[in-house]
Amino acid sequence: MSITVMTFNLRYDKPDPGIQQWGKRFTAIASLIQHYQPDLLGTQEGKIHQLVDLQSLLPEYQYIGGDRTGTGNGEHCAIFYKPQVLKLQETQDFYLSDTPEIPGSITWGNRLPRMATWGTFTINNYRISITIVNTHLDHENVKARDLGAALVNVKLTEFSAENYLLLTGDFNTSPHNTARTIFANNPQIQDSLSSIPLEKQKTFHNFTGSAWDAIDTIYCDRRFQIQQVIIDDQQWEGLWPSDHFPVIAKLSILS
């Protein structure tokens, strides 16, 4: 059996000027998602109205996850999934701080709260469970980013050993830096982009179409076979859907 997984920083509704505005972009994002038909999609930066806008165009999807402030008004690390393929068993948010159970908590010197959302699913017609963790590490504070990665890495060890693990996110740092090497040294998971040259792993382009930083990826359980991994660097509906390119991985499990 196979599944398709995507990670995509949606770009929060700032708002931006011209065709970079959310109101101009979200139909292009929906078209991109419909093209790849991911079974699981980890998103970053979406506010509640953005998630609602997307779901209105993607009725085959549901999503899980709260926001990073605990008020409902902040950015989410929402996970979209196809209920016709996956049955949600459990989900929870945690916050990247010394008090991960407290929404909006900040203890590592970062200016903004950071979080992760996870969900455990069973695959319909298969006796297989998948746990996906989706996060967005800090973009300014190296200590907060590294400690956030360490916390997420510990959380990965707490799920049942039988579960196939996925980790999606905007990690705000390239593969050779500490936060990413924490995940690279985790024996349970592999970076789906690691087999291609670093120059080809770049995803952040700031609406220019020319990426210069490799900060988004999908880590997957080593029991998955990576059939294909794509960074979609195309325009959709005549514009850049976001300031990041999405990463799409097609994975298979021998059964």
Image (tube, rainbow, N blue to C red):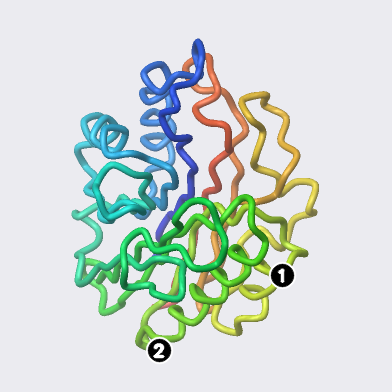
Query: What is the x, y in percent for residue 35?
Result: 42, 35
Task: Name the residue at 37% across, 83% down.
Answer: 159
Q: Residues within 10 Å of mark 2 (few under 14, many from 20)?
A: few
Q: Quadrant of the C terminus?
A: bottom left
Task: Name the residue at 49% across, 59% down.
Answer: 168
The tally of labels here is 2
Q: Check disc 1 and report the residue beneath it.
A: 178
Quarter assignment of residue 121 = bottom left
Q: Secondary structure at mark 2?
A: loop
**Amino acid found under the numbered disc labelled 2:** Ala
Question: Is residue 239 placed above or below 12 in the rendered structure?
Answer: above
**Amino acid found under the numbered disc labelled 1:** Thr
Quarter assignment of residue 89 = bottom left
Determine the CA span between mark 1 and mark 2.
Answer: 25 Å
As drawn, is 172 to the left or to the right of 238? right
Query: What is the x, y in percent for residue 7?
Result: 48, 50
Residue 228 visible? The answer is no
Question: Is residue 252 placed above or below 34 in the rendered structure?
Answer: below
Question: Is residue 84 placed above or below 251 in the rendered structure?
Answer: above
Task: Name the residue at 61% across, 25% down.
Answer: 207
Q: Check disc 2 and report the residue beneath it.
A: 161
Question: Is residue 105 placed above or below 161 in the rendered structure?
Answer: above
Q: Residues within 10 Å of mark 1 (few under 14, many from 20)?
A: some
Task: Name the residue at 70% across, 62% down.
Answer: 194
